[in-house]
Amino acid sequence: MRGEPRDGRIVIVGASLAGLRAAEKLRAEGFAGSLTLVGEEPQPPYDRPPLSKQVLLGKVPAENTGLPQRREVDAEWRLGVRATGLDPFGKRVLLADGEEVSFDRLLIATGTRARPWPNPAEAALDGVFTLRTSDDAGRLAERLDAGPRRVLVIGAGFTGSEIASACRERGLEVTVAERGPAPLVGALGGTLGTLATRLQRAHGVDLRCGVTVTALEGNGRLTGAQFSDGTRIDADVAVVALGAVRNTEWLAESGLAAGPRGVTCDAGCRAFDMYGIVTDDIFAAGDVARFPHPLFEYQLLSLEHWGNAVAQAEVAAHNMVNPGPRRRPHLTVPAFWSSQFGLNIKSVGVPTFSDQVVIAQGSLKDARLVAVYGYRGRVTAAVSVNQAKWLEYYQRLIETAAPFPPAPGAADRPESLVPVPSDVPDPKMLSHGPTVALTGHLPDRRLTVVQPAR
Amino acid sequence: MNVVVDLNRCQGYAQCAFLAPQVFTMHGEESLLYTPVIAEDQDERVRRAAAACPVQAIVVGKEAGSGAR
Amino acid sequence: MAADTLFRRITDYAHRADPYPLYAELREAGVVRQEDGSYLVGTYHEIAALLHDPRISSDRRNRAVPDETAAGEQGVPPSFIGLDDPEHHRLRRLAMRSFGPPHTPGRIDAMEGEITRIVKDLIAGFEGKKRIDIVDDFAYPLPVTVICRLLGVPTEDEPRFRLWSDTIVAGFDPTPGEDPAERQRAGSEARKAMGLYLGELAEKRRNRPSDDMLSAFINNEGPDGRLTQLEIMTTAVLLLIAGHETTVNLITNGILTLLRHPDELDRLRSEPPLMPKAVEELLRYEPPVQMLPQRTPLADIEVLGVTIPKGAPLILMLASGNRDPQRFRDPDRFDPTREDNQHLGFGSGMHSCFGAPLARMETQLALTALIQHLDKPRLVEDPPPYRRSPVLRGPRHLLIEDDRAGA
């Protein structure tokens, strides 16, 4: 019967990782009704992490990053068409081609897009790129193949740093410009930011911190860039890596609590409306979702993480086809990885939710370590550099709110166990947007817009 | 067939890079890079690699949405 | 049964053929303290957590009461299996340079043809026999031949190092109450003798490299240096022993298990692509390394409400964790198609088995070829006679009869 948990019509808007895994999970949980996936990009779901690594290194063609399916999903795929609106009364999703799709339950998984360069004329110069989609990656890889004389990377978050790493590995000259004091500092704080600075310079990156790009120069084609410190460089490729923008504009008239920080939902992935009332037929998952997390004082978290997209999509799908008492909360500890300059960086917890950090294992000197973060005397995050095998131990410390600093006794005798301030800068001081944001407790989008960053 | 690795789970045991070295490669000591679209002659090796993964991080399957219109 | 006698019963040779009911008792009992002050852990989640706990040392010199294996050894330091980071990491990485990725990624994959040939030759050797010993005729010679070629050790010397190897394995047998000091002293002597032998072999290859690991150890200098002579000896001893004392058990346990589950044997015979998963299930169901006897906490650590004091011997019962119903559905069932199978057969964490990919490949190829060759194999004796060690557990002989064995 229509509207019964395992029957009816489910529409998933967003056909990337979260959308796909949700579709699989719906079928795995016995959903037998009609399933429609709407995706703006024409390609079937593909994996994005390889775009800034294998693809830019020239090892994998951009169009060859398609995701494997874990099971048949028996869905109608509406690819290459954007959702333009949501009618919550008629329970319809409006599409850019003028068609509409009706639903009994809806999953919003529209993710994010690359934040564009703010000056449209400069952004339109040939040689200026962003990196989010496989098309972006294909175009950029092709340009790198052509052997540009210098690549400018604007923003030294994870994406910008990975791009710089791939360019250096290909032997290309690279300048990285970051408004903050160091690469990765916005996500990992001062101690590992200093390590990242050292690594980039050791790998021959022309790293410029504390500056902004004031102009991209060129006449049709990019020729160079000017910096806020008065210097300039010649460059024929610039990659804008300023972070992401959440794809929520299509929800402007929907009455949902949707805004620049995402679609606010509860621990069960049910979306809130703009009055803070939870809906029961609209769910959100992945990069676009903003959800409360018990480990971080129930503040609403916005995450741009592969693992969160998978985990949250599965919880959302489960809850879409199960009655109230059988619903599950999304409690996964945030986790991500980055591969750059020959190092594997992995994180659990939220390093920015910290006041102190300690090198609990290994050493900065060897660039092989585990850094543990604490907030008011409890462990809130850990980051490993080429030491991933230990990370699950620290994840348990996070999950159990263990005291910070962690007890000594590590068998590899780290050089110093004295915690230092974690030095996480205000995100407003950085070029790139944060991939993890704690965004307070208020669900209403109009209130969250004016909420200060920290 | 396509492959994706959950690199949150991956701890760098490198079993896949031993058993299917044309598909999975270690980049440095701990980072894993892989080819998401597998050539047919690598199917068997990839299956062995997926079975051997100590943290069960490798998903192998038909390309998702390949029948999409 | 009092908990403090449980380990005596587990290590008692009388229970070698089926220690699993005792492991169930151990899991029921939680963390068990023995009369000698050592601690046993047999539940999956606790073992897995301890293998990833940075406060657990693998270096026996950190024990409150160091034993012969740890302390003396006539100046021979531990190999990397008995060291912590950063020394462990340096040695393991240097050994890995000539074995696998990132520096030698294709080595094991390239051995598939050779292993297949060795397997074929061994099976050809069944010719004329109606009764074969899976251990002596197949499961032992295969890994010995492979590890000898890999390291660059003459196979003809096998009788020499087999004796040393037996003595070394007996040396770390944790069975209580059988004058461990004497066994450990003999083990140390054998280890030293084997080290000198392998060191000499390596020395002969200095400046005359061939494509084997001893050559690479003595000739290759990487960005992070090279192994010293002493380190070459300890590392080569470790690899030679590990390379042929464990895979033999995995292959033999594999055949034994398949003969006890004829439906699964038939299925694997008709669907060879299932073999990789079947080998993972064997690693869970009958792991060749039953326990890790040489861990030591560097701080007081609480596990399941019991405080394991700093410096106490800590024994992790991998084979028990592999049968933990809290982790595995229907754990005592052999299911070669098991989906959720994150077993502890090769350990876990930073000391996870160095040679695992080689053991996997050898076992997959060996079992596939053997079950294709045999027609209606029958166990002559069940249970078969077992080897002495409770750590590296497996049959000493496994006699089977088959109409086609020698066909």
Image (tube, rainbow, N blue to C red):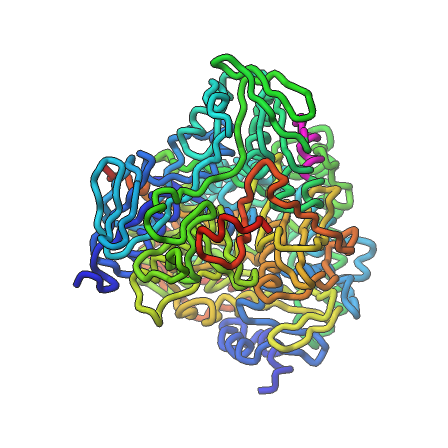
Q: Is residue A94 left or right of residue A285?
A: left
Q: Residue furthest left?
A: A1
Q: Is residue C32 visible?
A: yes
Residue at 76 percent of width and 66 percent of height: C63
Q: Where is A428 relative to C288, above or below? A: above
Q: Nearer the viewer, residue C263 or A424?
A: A424
Asked if residue C355 lies in the magenta stretch, the reply is no
Most extreme residue toward the bottom is: C1
Q: Residue furthest top?
A: A219
Residue depicted at x 59% and y 27%: A169
C187 relative to A389 in the view: left or right = right
Give the residues in magenta.
A196-208
Camera-side residue: A13 or A226?
A226
Can you say which quadrant of the picture contains the C terminus of chain B?
top left
Query: Which image quadrant is residue A84 in?
Result: top left
Question: Relative to residue B54, is residue C391 depicted above or below?
Answer: below
Residue A27, compared with residue C227, is above or below; it is: below
The front one of A355 and A229 is A229
The one of A210 and C274 positioned closer to us in this rendering = A210
Query: Where is residue A91 shown, x and y percent of the image?
Result: 24, 53
Residue at image location 44% in from the left, 62% down from the top: A267
Looking at the rendered structure, the number of numbered marks drawn on it comes to: 0
Q: Quadrant of the N terminus of chain B?
A: top left
Identify the residue shown where x is 22% and y is 37%: A98
On the image, the x and y values in percent for residue B38 come to: 38, 36
Residue C327 place in picture, x, y as percent: 47, 67
Is C25 placed left or right of A111 in the picture?
A: right
Residue A198 is one of the magenta-drawn residues = yes
Residue C236 visible? The answer is no
Residue C314 is situated, as x and y percent measured from the top left of the image, at 67, 69
